[in-house]
Amino acid sequence: MQKDKRIILFARFPEPGKTKTRLIPALGPAGAADLHARMAEQTLVKIRRFAKQHSAGFEICFAGGSKEKILGWLGKDVSPSPQSFGDLGLRMSTAFRRAFNQGAKQVVLVGTDIPELTEGCFEKAFDALASHDVVLGPSTDGGYWLVGMKQNLNIFSGISWGSPEVLSQTLKGFEGRLSSHLLSPLRDVDTLEDLASILPHEVSRRPYVSVIIPALNEEQNLQNAIRSAEDEAAEILVVDGGSTDATVGRALGTGARVLKTGRGRALQQNSGAKEAKGKVLLFLHADTLLPEGYVNHVFDLLLNKKVILGAFRFKTTLHTPLMRFFEKAVHVRSTIFQMPYGDQGLFLKKKTFQALGGFPATPIAEDMLLVTRAVKRGRVQIAPAAALTSGRRWEKKGIFRTFLINQMVVMGLAMGVSPGKLASLYHHKAGNFFPTDETRG
């Protein structure tokens, strides 16, 4: 049933580098996009509360992304529709016209960057529309954070969008022919000054992602792995398990943080996670390279509320037909069965990692056991880009043999064989080349 009152949330899909660009110098591309996403989500919470209490409808009119991505991000109840082409005025005018054509009697449109917005603001806006043609919520920068109408009106022509005269030009444009009501002014978040005034706790810059690299005698590979992870949105933590070569020195030479623990990949990764400052944790093997732009892939996948854990496609440095076949087999396993391995660069939010209890303290398959826990709580998604893993272990003992050993471990875990027994089998079958805490394919 069509509801008389409707709220339109004008939103942009969060994309690092394209969202809240004036805040990027202070927060970084991913930090600015993450702030935008959280403000939009908080605004939607308030809209949902009002809609439920007052029998109002609501929809998302979005720019960027896609309908599927909006639904994954904000939920299936948001009724997403793309914004039209043209300037802001034309896009808002189109959204209003569509809402009235669908039967709405009173329509209010708001943006996503007004932290001081409350459910009471919507109540006052709809109350004002009972006796006025137009309601506007002035913002302190000369624009407005809300606009409402009770019929489709042409009030957005001849406006210098983005200028301090937006509100005054809008009022002057319909002066004498329409009645209007102004709500209390609120401040939207566009600049660092706005952010410091309204959300001062958000001003300090923090890494979006912490890349945690467990290492043991990896002097030949570590620096390349670190370089692949370097990004202004990332901190890099190398967790050394007692290397006797130049691993620690080379890690320090790159500027990465170095932690020292006992040996064991689960222990090392859990120790790194405990010290990590990022919102997201990404676990990277020391002989694996992340794809270019990996932060954007991480951000995009984890924005979907159904995705609990992500990973990259599996690829090695070997280029034989048999290796390419097994890479495709791994992709099938990762996507259909949602079972990526550690050398695919597992990533998830830190709070999720903590809720899952971290990596289990086992001598083998700690990655599989974590993923098994995760898939019970949400979706495991594979990014379209590939992490490139060294083919040294596959090449040393043979591609087919290595693949079979890995599958024996998978089947053993599925049958309930303890990781300790599997570790002994793995070590024996691999002919002592694969230590229990080394990378698998």
Image: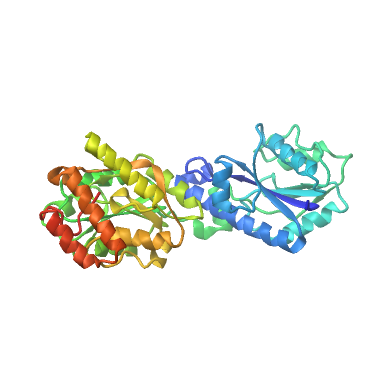
Q: Residue at x 75, y 56 (%)?
A: 56
Compared to residue 417, the image places residue 101 above or below, namely: above
Please give left or right for residue 92 compared with residue 361 in the image: right
Q: Position of residue 306 (x, y in %)?
A: 50, 55
Please give left or right for residue 137 compared with residue 353 in the image: right
Q: Position of residue 7 (x, y in %)?
A: 72, 51
Please give left or right for residue 302 compared with residue 398 in the image: right
Q: Position of residue 160 (x, y in %)?
A: 69, 34
- Tell which of 59 and 432 is nearer to you: 432
* Residue 439 visible from this viewpoint: no
Please tell me how many numbered marks the rendered image carries: 0
- Tell which of 326 and 59 is nearer to you: 326
Q: Residue at x 58, y 55 (%)?
A: 41
Q: Position of residue 399 (x, y in %)?
A: 19, 43
* Residue 257 visible from this viewpoint: yes
Compared to residue 356, the image places residue 18 above or below, namely: above
Structure colour scheme = rainbow
Q: Residue at x 78, y 58 (%)?
A: 124
- Tell which of 30 and 355 is nearer to you: 355
Q: In the picture, residue 350 is in which quadrant?
A: bottom left
